[in-house]
Image (cartoon, rainbow, N blue to C red):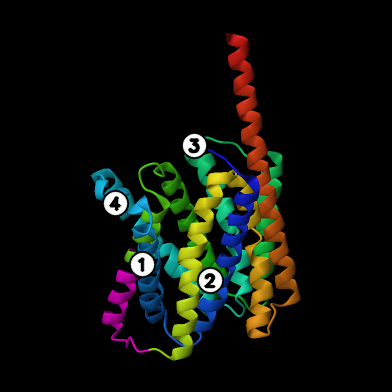
Amino acid sequence: MLKSPLKGYSFALLATLAGSTVYIFSKAALSEISLPQFGFYWFSLAIFWNAAYAFSTPEHRRFKAISKQSLKVMLWIGLIEIVATTTFYAAISVASNAAIPSFLRNMEYIFVAVMGVLLLGERFAKLEMLGVILTLVGVLVISYHKDTSLQSFVTGTSGLMVVSTIFYAIRTISAKKHIETVTPIMLAINRAVFLFVFAAILLFILNQSIVISRFAFINILIGSFLGPFLTSLGQYNALKHIEASRSAILQSSTALFVLLGAYMYFGKLPLAYQIVGGLFTIIGAILLIIGRRIHFKCLYTRKATIGIKQT
């Protein structure tokens, strides 16, 4: 039940601001340590933050009654998260600027919409199609480089973010389908556990040390609190008070906060054409979200009108 729009927008803004710091603090840490080392500390701390929150609220009681079906769902989503999140942080690691993967993250809205068309038989409205086109144009502009080869694209930031956003879209669809039985805090802890175990296995296989620099650990400590914990908390509480589409519109602008934060933290901006492409992805994502909201509102109105006429 939606209660307070002002409170909802406040939580959505909190999620947006906290989410933007993930790109900055993870980029700073990954400039000094490997991806498995990063994952080992980032997600062990994420387990701690989320578990502490769960046990401080009645939410922890839900864990005692998890069904076998819910466990299967969490296993499935956990495996998806390994691919989605690993490629996400790999993209941040190889990016020339933290803002670039944040612009490319808006591709997730396209893949969520496409899956709705393929799996649920939905249709694209004209405004949605315009949003998709603008987002794709933005991605192509960001990815442009005269010396880019297929191999460098696949292993570079853009290619990794394509893989990441596809799997994040699958995760989003799966989570929405089972949100009544698997709560957001369950998903957050489940995600952190799967990724921590995966990072620990990689550390063992690659024979890498768990000793990292103080600078890297401080960035991970701050980022893991603001990212995996505070962002999820803000998103969940926002959905209690405002519609998901309204929250998504605000969160689609995350890249603008990353752009500002990256400049303040690293003293560096992306190239001009990359910023222009990034703005296209933001505008495209907003049009796509608004278009879907209008589309479903009109669809609901038509069904209600038909129902009234039939009675």
**Label 1 crowd (10 A; few <14 / some 14-19 / many >=20):** many
Badge 1 or badge 4: first in the primary sequence: 1
The kind of residue on which mark 1 rests is Ile
User: Which secondary structure dominates the residues rendered in magenta?
Assistant: helix
CA–CA distance between discs 4 and 2? 28 Å
**Label 3 crowd (10 A; few <14 / some 14-19 / many >=20):** few
Badge 4 or badge 2: first in the primary sequence: 2
Is residue 209 visible to the viewer in this orientation of the structure? yes
**Label 4 crowd (10 A; few <14 / some 14-19 / many >=20):** few
Give the labeled residue for mark 4. 63
The x and y percentages for residue 146 are 68, 76
What quarter of the picture does the C terminus occupy? top right
Kindly check if marks 4 and 2 are in contact, taking CB atoms under 8 A apart as contact: no
CA–CA distance between discs 2 and 1? 16 Å
* SS label for mark 1: helix
The kind of residue on which mark 4 rests is Phe
Give the labeled residue for mark 3. 120
Corner quadrant of residue 255: bottom right
Q: Is residue 15 above or below residue 205?
A: above
Q: Nearer the viewer, mark 3 or mark 4?
A: 4
Q: Residue 207 in magenta?
A: yes
Q: Residue 181 in magenta?
A: no
Kindly check if marks 2 and 1 are in contact, taking CB atoms under 8 A apart as contact: no
The kind of residue on which mark 2 rests is Val
Badge 2 or badge 1: first in the primary sequence: 2
CA–CA distance between discs 3 and 2? 32 Å
Q: Nearer the viewer, mark 4 or mark 2?
A: 4
Q: Is residue 276 above or below residue 234?
A: below
Of 137 and 286, nearer the camera is: 286
Q: Residue at x 37, y 59 (%)?
A: 56
Q: Is residue 24 above or below residue 188?
A: below
